[in-house]
Amino acid sequence: MTTFTKITTASMIALGLGAAASADELTLYTALEEEEIAAYIEAAQKAMPDTEINVLRLSTGKLGARILAEAGNPQADVIWGWAVSAMMDPQILEMLEPYEAKGVDVLPAKFRADDGKWFAPIGYMGAFCVNTARLEEKGLPMPKSWKDLENPAFKDEILMPDPNSSGTGYLHVNAVLQSMGEEAGWAQLEAIDPNMAQYTSSGSKPCKSARVGEYTVGVSVALTAMQSISEGYPLAMVFPEGGVGYELEASGLMASSDNKDAAKAFLDWTMSDEAIGLYQQYKSLITIPGVDASEAAEKAGLPADISTVLADIDFVEAAQNQTAVKATWKEKLGR
């Protein structure tokens, strides 16, 4: 889904893309979820009252295509909250200008670029969203691993995002391949394919469909699972055995920006105490040392030490292999 919005202090209204932002405007490109974008921008706009903040929201894959298509005439001032495995594309990195946002020095080295072109105070992690009411109604066992999804009883009961359009989809596929090895990983993904009702273009849709009982299992993101559980849906958040995939959400300054002062001010804001407080409400993964998870996360079952459920991910490898993995996926599992 494409969302381009002009954010004011109290409202969000549609806006079309025109020329590059003027001196009192700031254009952000992001793949963050719409629910969190609204909260972040409302707060950022109050902190930057003299700057009109515009946001273009696209899925991870579509955002990358958009940025590359605009390479000759970039429209964004800032890339904000985008999968680091996508940000590491050499063509994208060439468009970024090093900038060390205020407070970014507290981030462990693995969560920021050595050359200052990106930093990632937040991230997201995958999860199985299991509708417990539908599970019980159909007499299905609680899935605890990818292998459990091979059970023929789950036929047409599972949704999963397509890695060619969804960063969440690639997160899951990459985690399976890196944790199991390429041969075993592809075999696993092919083994559960007969049970897939649909591969979606959105990473959150599988969970949103599962929570209302349309399907039993949504291979999705922990954020949507946590929100759904907090809102009272009959949902369980399951982290598959062997480690769940996760992704860092990176931000960086576009070298072509005509409004670098505002762009830098916004990047500084993303490391502010106010922003961190909002991350605690919305994020399952915060890389800033000493920041605790939210009560909603704890209620949903997120462990205090999330490293116990995360797969061991090599993001450089994930970035380098992304094109090949997506092509193989399309060949083997594309619909």
Image: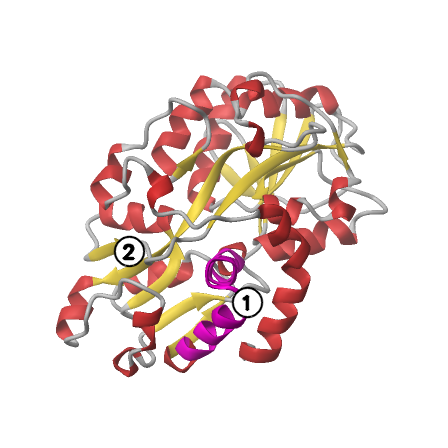
Residue 222 screen position, x and y as percent: 36, 49
Q: Which residue is drawn at 58% across and 37% down?
A: 250
Q: Residue at x 74, y 25 (%)?
A: 259
Q: Which residue is drawn at 37% across and 40% down?
A: 307
Residue 184 lies left or right of residue 136; in this view the side is: right
Residue placed most toward the observer, 246 or 300 = 246
Give the magenta part as a residue range. Answer: 170-192
Callout 1 amino acid: Glu
* Residue 95 forms part of the magenta stretch: no
* Residue 191 forms part of the magenta stretch: yes
Q: Residue at x 53, y 30 (%)?
A: 8
Tell me the CA gap for discs 2 and 1: 23 Å
Residue 280 screen position, x and y as percent: 36, 30
Where, by quadrant of the figure, is residue 101 drawn? top right
Q: How many marks?
A: 2
Residue placed most toward the observer, 139 or 146 = 146
Residue 13 screen position, x and y as percent: 53, 41
Residue at the extreme right: 72
Disc 1 on helix, strand or loop?
helix
Q: Mark 1 points at which residue?
A: 182
Q: Is the magenta stretch mostly helix, strand or loop?
A: helix
Q: Mark 2 points at which residue?
A: 238
- Residue 211 in sight from this viewpoint: no
